[in-house]
Structures are given as C-alpha cells and as structure tokens.
Image (tube, rainbow, N blue to C red):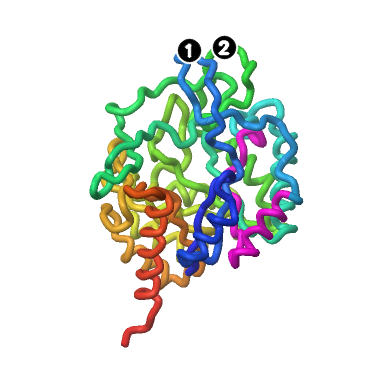
C-alpha cells in the first residue's frame, strides 16, 4: 500500500508537496474545486455557502493538469487523482437540467485529459446537498479542533435554493425559490446516466471513476435524497455499470458513521472485489446523527484491523488522511497531518512486515 496526501488548490505548492514527501508520502491527490471562495446564497434564509463555482467555464485544461503533475514530480511525488468535479462542470447532470448532455461532454473531456497526462483516478461525490451540516469544535483528544455532525443540535436543514448544488452557487441570477423535490429512484437514474456515459470513456483513457459515499451518511439531507448512505448501496452503484473503471473512493470515516452494516465486512467485501480506487483514512466517534472526527488512534474504528484486511486481500492502492484534527502549535494543519501520516506509516510497516 502507498501513502498519499490530499491538497486543496491553494495548498498545492512546492512547500506543501515537500512536506508530504518528508512525511513519507509517495502520492498526492489534488482538489481543483475552489470550495472556499466566498459567496452568498440567494435563498430565503440568506445563509452563507461554501463558495461560487466557476460556472460553465472551460474544463480544466491539459496544460494545468500537466503543470500540477510536474510540480508533484519535482518533489518526488506522483499525482494519483483529482478529487471532485466543480459543480459548474456538472450541475445539470446532478439536477437533470437542460445542459446535462453538454456538461457530460465536458466531463468526458476532463477524463480523457487525465488519461493523457497519466492521472489515473477521478474522484467524485454524486450528491445534490454535498457535505453539509458539520460544525467545528474541540472534539479530539486534548481539545484539538476537528469537525462533527450534531444532528438536531446542529444547523437547521434548510431547503436548497435554486441555483445551488453541493453548497456552491452555480447560477447567481436563478429565480427565487428552492429546488423541486425528487425521489431516491430519480437520483439513481441520474447517476446511471452519468456512469453509462463516463465509464466507457474512462476505460479507454485508463482512468478509474471513484465514488465517495455520502457524508453525513443519511437517507435524505436538506430535502434531497442520498445515494450511498449504507455500505450495501456501494454494491448497487457498482452493479449499474460493471467495470474496473467504475470504482470507489472508499472513505472509512463515512462508513464508520453509517448506522447499518459492519465496516470491517465492507472493507473485506469491496477490497476482495478489487473495487477500491483509493482509501480515505480517518477515524470518528459516534454515528449519524451525532458523531465527531477525532485523531486516527482514538476513534471507534480499529484502523489496524482495517489495514490488516486490506493487506490480506492484496490491496496495493493509496491511503489518504483526508481530514485530521488541528493541533495546538504554529502549524495546526501540518502537525495534525504529520501525526496521522506517521501513524499510517508505522502501522503499514507492522502489517506488511513478515513475522519474525
């Protein structure tokens, strides 16, 4: 198994790439979506969202992807994956809107470009509400700041305004009102359309599409249905378009948060199938609707047991600490990530070394 680090666009710098290599990483995952660009929803509650998408701008260029790949290579790292499409690239695919066919062609172009520059994985989260409702607090050991989901004690589940998906505004001038309700089956029909169009292109390009489970893993959120909120629903997704290119961005934290199934059974099942494109390696305490993200060695999930299962089943892909608590020092994010990466590196050495 290999160790990687996810970096947001603004963090994809030589210094942070060098930090990743020094901490034992061999690979990186890039987030090109500018989640944190400030913008304001235009719905009835005036709530602030994560950001404004770049709209129907040109998909990420081959030159940009090559630049990122080469930046990583200069620091001894391989750019393994891009994580998440920009809502501006595919909001009508998610919403079954009038531009969905045009946007599917844009997504195909992105996947082909990834293949041409040697980036092997495209992670995605097929969700209308996205990752929503988390709060920050001193939830980890020693009062370290992390995120949690508090259910009824957290933010109220307000309807999603028109012109928004994934907490980001793609149409600032949309008509007032909120998104029309849809059924779970309608959302599954939309992901089928997406996969039937994209999987053959990904196969030809040598790229794997990797689906993230819902976080928080609830059957509905903000009045919209969710896809993978229990472990067995990953199988339904794989069965829609069976192919090595239809794969999983396997988030252990999200799986542990789910209320049904056994997380170790899920690790065993999907790793034996060879369905894991890469693994998000984080730990939590609690389950929906009330959980907290904590240090890698203090949560409810036995990370050593999970790694033993992956090793036994021959998984040789990437482990990525997608989140980590912020530690009390001058570099809170770096310290939290360094602690997590050191833990993973030590446990990997133990699990993969033959007994003496």
Q: Judge from the rendering whether residue 237 lies leftward or rightward of residue 118; answer left or right.
A: left
In magenta segment, residue 250: no
Spatial CA span between label 1 and label 2: 8 Å
Determine the secondary structure under disc 1.
loop
Estimate the x, y position of residue 37 in percent, counting from the top left.
56, 32
Q: Residue 176's mark? A: 2
Front residue of 106/37: it is 37
Query: Which residue occupies the extreme bottom position in the image?
Result: 356
Q: Residue 44's mark? A: 1
The residue shown at (39%, 38%) is 216
Q: Is residue 234 above or below residue 52?
A: below
Estimate the x, y position of residue 291 in percent, counting from the top left.
29, 41
Estimate the x, y position of residue 282 in percent, counting from the top left.
38, 53
Contact flag, marks 1 and 2 (Cβ < 8 Å): yes
Mark 1 or 2, nearer chain start: 1
Residue 201 in sight in this render? no
> Mark 2: few, some, or many residues within 10 Å (few <14, many ≥20)?
few
When asked about the image quadrant of residue 95, the answer is top right
């Amino acid at each position: 198994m290999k160790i990687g680090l996810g970096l947001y666009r603004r963090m994809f710098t030589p210094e942070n790439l060098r930090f990743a290599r020094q901490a034992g990483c061999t690979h990186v995952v890039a987030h090109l979506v500018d989640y944190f660009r400030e913008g304001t929803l235009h719905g009835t509650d005036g709530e602030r969202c994560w950001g404004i998408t770049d709209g129907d701008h040109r998909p990420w260029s081959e030159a940009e992807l090559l630049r990122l790949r080469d930046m990583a290579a200069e620091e001894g790292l391989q750019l393994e994956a891009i994580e998440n499409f920009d809502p501006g690239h595919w909001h009508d695919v998610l919403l079954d809107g009038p531009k969905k066919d045009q946007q599917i062609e844009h997504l195909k172009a992105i996947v082909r470009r990834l293949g041409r520059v040697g980036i092997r994985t495209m992670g995605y989260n097929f969700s209308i509400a996205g990752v929503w409702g988390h709060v920050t607090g001193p939830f980890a050991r020693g009062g370290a700041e992390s995120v949690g989901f508090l259910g009824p004690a957290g933010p109220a589940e307000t309807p999603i305004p028109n012109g928004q998906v994934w907490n980001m505004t793609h149409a600032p001038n949309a008509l007032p009102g909120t998104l029309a309700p849809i059924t779970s089956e309608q959302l599954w029909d939309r992901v089928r359309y997406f996969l039937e169009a994209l999987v053959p292109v990904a196969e030809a390009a040598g790229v794997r599409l990797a689906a993230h489970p819902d976080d928080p893993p609830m059957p509905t959120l903000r009045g919209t249905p969710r896809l993978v909120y229990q472990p067995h629903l990953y199988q339904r997704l794989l069965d829609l378009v069976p192919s090595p290119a239809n794969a999983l961005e396997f988030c252990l934290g999200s799986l542990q948060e789910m209320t049904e199934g056994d997380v170790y059974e899920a690790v065993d099942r999907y790793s034996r199938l060879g369905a894991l494109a890469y693994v998000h390696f984080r730990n939590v305490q609690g389950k929906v609707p009330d959980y907290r993200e904590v240090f890698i060695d203090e949560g409810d999930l036995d990370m050593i047991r999970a790694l033993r299962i992956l090793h036994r089943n021959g998984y040789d892909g990437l482990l990525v600490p997608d989140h980590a608590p912020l530690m009390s020092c001058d570099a809170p994010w770096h310290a939290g990530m360094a602690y997590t990466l050191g833990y993973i590196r030590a446990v990997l050495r133990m699990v993969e070394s033959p007994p003496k």
